[in-house]
Amino acid sequence: MQLPAQQVAVLEAASADEATSVDALAAATDLPPETVTGAAFELEEDGLVAVAERVDETVALTEEGREYATDGLPEVRLYETALEAGADADPVSMGQVIGASGLEGAQVDIALSNYARKGYGTIDSGEITADPDADPAADAEANALESLAADGVLEGSEDVLDQLERRGLVEITESTVREVTLTDQGVTELMAGVETAETVGEVTPELLTSGEWEDVEFAEYNVEADAETVEGGRIHVLREMSERVKDVLVGMGFEEMDGPHADADFWINDCLFMPQDHPARTHWDRFALEQPTHIDELPEDLVERVERAHREGVGDDGEGYHSPWDEDFARALALRGHTTSLSTRYLSGTEIGEIEPPARYFSVEKAYRNDTLDATHLLEFYQIEGWVMAEDLSVRDLMGTFEEFYAQFGIEDIQFKPHYNPYTEPSFELFGTHPTTGELIEIGNSGIFREEMLEPLGVDCDVMAWGLALERLAMLTTGAEDIRDLHGTLADLEFLRNAEVTY
Amino acid sequence: MPTVDIDPDELRELTGHEEKDDDELVDDLFGLGLEFEGWTEDDEFELEFAPDRLDRLSVEGVARSMRYQYGDARGVHVPSTNSAEWTIEVDESVPDERPYVTGAVIRDVNLDEDALDSLIQLQEKLHATMGRKRAKGAIGIHDLTMLKGGSATEGDSTIQYVGVEPEEDRFVPLDSDAEMTPADVLEDHQTGQTYADLVSGYERYPAIYDDIGLFSFPPVINGRRTEVSTDSRDLFVEMTGTDQWTIDKMLNIVCYALTARGATLEDVTVEYPDSESASADSNGSRTQSGGRDLVRPDLSTKTKTVSHDRIETILGIDLDPDEVIDLAERSGLDAEKVEDEGESEREESITPLEQRDGLEERSSADGSSGPRENDEAAPVGDLVYEVTIPPYRVDVLHPLDVIDDLGRAYGFNDLEPTYPDVGTVGGRHERSRLERAVRTQLVGLGFEDLLNFHMTNEEVNYERVDVEPDAGVYGAGEPATIKEPYSEDYTILRTWCLPSLLMVLENNTHRAYPQHLSEVGFAAEVDETENTGVAEGRHVGAVLASHDAGYEDAKARLQALARDFDVDLETPATDHPTFISGRAANVVIDGETVGVVGEIHPKVLVEHDLEVPVAAFEFDLEALR
């Protein structure tokens, strides 16, 4: 493992067998004791050492104490002078003895007050006697002072110490002593090898400009812990899907179309060879506009050709619909029920001029259906619309194009169910296998545009087309269960924030 | 899509394939484009059908298609008819709105319960589809023995199709015991009420009489006297409508269904009066009503000329002429090879869209670059077929429809997909690229991109953000309105995005803040100078909701966008009721006022149950172009 240098030093200096004091460790590691203490505690947090604590008393001589240790205690000096003066036989004048002893000032009182207490003799009426049996060498206080001065070790009883402290000769201080012992885990880690890591908390401008960064290690973080939740900006999940679809189609050579959402039924339905009495054109499917009501202008000659196709069909033995056709109905405005209105506008040459084959066009734009609003249906949804124009196109080309497209989204094994659309023939519903559930699901509608549609638009080659709802593709690939979470003002920000990114 | 209920036992009986189990039948039906939706309460298949093959709306028609599919039947079959004994005389009093009638007599019908149920379902499904809910065509089926024909013409029996005053006559309608006038029926009878709208504008009501009296009030209800039951042996079928072709085809489908159960057909003569009503309609005249008398049912076939080359082009495979004929017969069609008509004749072949570029050029290119599997198609490139279409088919308008049939018989799913070998250059249009770029910048500025509905209502768009429609402030233009909205929530197209964004904030007050939301989205307003009358545009809208959101936050991001797209931004103070006075400004880009920025007014915040300040901006996407 890696540890900061101080911790490594302490760990290595500590012993598993006996407790080592911080001071001892400091001495051993050549680190200040406080550094050692800090390191010891951090090591203890990691379970590598145990730190034991006790409070120690330290005894030190005061200045006075040191003086007496050198010169002798005043009462001892008084006794020794008294002995020389022969006070062991007869009382001697105190003044004479004090003068001879060299004691001065406060020392005289100290000597006198302790002389009798310690049994060196008596002091009475200005005269002093010395007890011949007294032994200054056995003076516990003097001995204690002496030994403290000599090697710092106190000899003597608690009482002596108290006496010395009372006399102001020693000072007793308490200190906390910490002792460090390696734990089993510490031993294990040491044996496994511990490396030095020097750390600092933050990268600061000073650190960088001073060059100090070269010598430091950065404090380790708990990199596994969850960080604060951040809601960054992000593209809407359905928009991502749309971008993905556009990428794929552009890559396949398709150019994008653009056009009105509110459009004449002429472009939405009549140009698609949808009979005017087709059930899908009745009010309950369609969002007709109340205001404004009708388109201003339609290309007159095109209207004429479209009407003729509806009434009479195209070609020598073509037939039209046996349905009424009314230009006023064709001019009525509605929200487009499919984006095929863009295709009819482009194919007619009114948007970007005549389009020459080969050409591929697409759009991923909104369509509107007055149908139902529930978990899988919206009143407005994005329709993917694409068509290919070329001189000769077969249903095999159509199949190949769609297989290529859907394979980009992981949908393989496309099946083509023959189908009916008023505007395509042959027509196919496209079925594919759901990438996760394996279920066979409808994924689009396709076909080759009918000649009754193309001839009035002035197109004299083949055009194949297909469409599907973007939301359907998104639900397939994102697993969303309620389409309204994705799209619209009921959108749940939590859902959008947690949605997987599409790419 | 519409559905039809089919009894699998009857299907086995009518196809003669008793050995097929239910699963096999379901598979075979899928091959016909009839998708199994589930079982009905009466243990029948509920099948979804595409509304082209209306001849498959009953078990008899489905069985016929399956017999072709199984190879048990081939080619076109037209039942014979006995000559007419009955005449429908059309009176001049018939309402102009519903001038057409057709009919047939069907004898020796064996109507057991199943057959009767099937007939009733067929009638209902035809009403719902071709009949356009009886408006275009309505079917009446009567027990012939209950009709008394009289002798308008010697030896013949006659009924009359007439127009009557609403209160002119009385009859006992189905499901009733009382004599009622047509007006009473519309008023009091349940079926009458359902279909009253169809005739509500008529001065005279359609009515059919025999010698005894009024027995049918089309398209509303039949009389009880002629009600068909399982005891009925001979039937009189009449149909009235707004288009002769439509009712004639509906009649054919009914006739085919009944002959499949062993009945025989007998013609009916339809006599139109010598007035304009019969010949005025071009459709009518094309179905031979140009003359005074029509003989019905019209079981004549028609033909389509289909070129061999076009078949191969569309299907993308090479076919032998015998194969084409075989595929046609397996589709219930007849195909006859017509010899090479030569260069000049080919101009009239059925591929007029392709002639100009020359067939030679195409067929020579096909072998190498087209989807052809080999190039041996050339020798039969000039071949055409005369394909006969049976009288029950209503969906064959063009030779292309025949090719679709051939493809189905061949099996579309047996075709090998190919990728079309034509090169084109893809690309996105400018607005699409600009939208993407702006969204990318917004996301970089910390916005969550949203996607809201374009439809909304006036309350959301105006009232709840405290603006008046067409008030002359940004966002409050005149809305395009929807005639028959789905619900009162979606009555107009939105004129701006901020109301939608505020609603998203409102619906997400329980979610973590800050909520910085943006939308580059559609907005529209009425504009008479536009061809469609609607000016459609994209707006860039954004809201910043957090405990300390303020004007500067919105302005800062607006500035960032302006810098990103290299446009000049100014924000002169303005008054806008959605925003706090003194904290709102116009967004002026390159000298033009294109939007608004500010702090949302507390009144609007409280209206949306918001407890944090919201700063916002919205402007026209075009301004960044």
Image (tube, coloured by chain):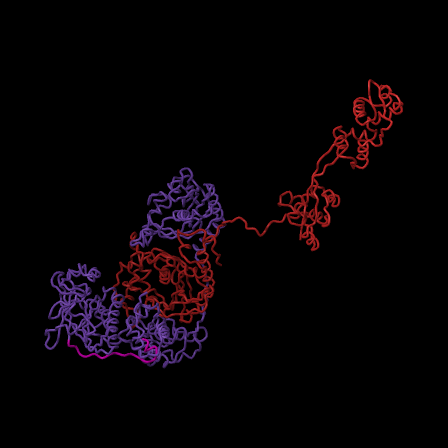
Quadrant location, the N terminus of chain B: bottom left
In the image, residue B510 lies at what x, y percent?
Answer: 44, 47
In the image, residue B307 lies at what x, y percent?
Answer: 35, 76
Instruction: Give the color of chain A as drawn.
Output: red
Please identify the quarter of the rendering in which residue B316 is found. Answer: bottom left
> A355 and A322: which one is in front?
A322
Direction from residue A207 to residue B154 in the image, left or right: left
Is residue A178 covered in magenta? no
Please identify the quarter of the rendering in which residue A364 is found. Answer: bottom left
Direction from residue A27 to residue B42 in the image, left or right: left
The segment highlighted magenta reads: B65-85
Is residue B73 covered in magenta? yes
Q: Is residue B215 above or below residue B498?
A: below
Given the current orientation, which residue lies at the most extreme top position?
Answer: A125
In the image, residue A372 lies at what x, y percent?
Answer: 34, 58
Task: Specify the chain shown as purple.
Answer: B
Residue B361 in view (yes/no): no
Direction from residue B219 to residue B444 in the image, left or right: right
Q: Is residue B400 above or below residue A63?
A: below
In the image, residue A228 lies at what x, y percent?
Answer: 53, 48
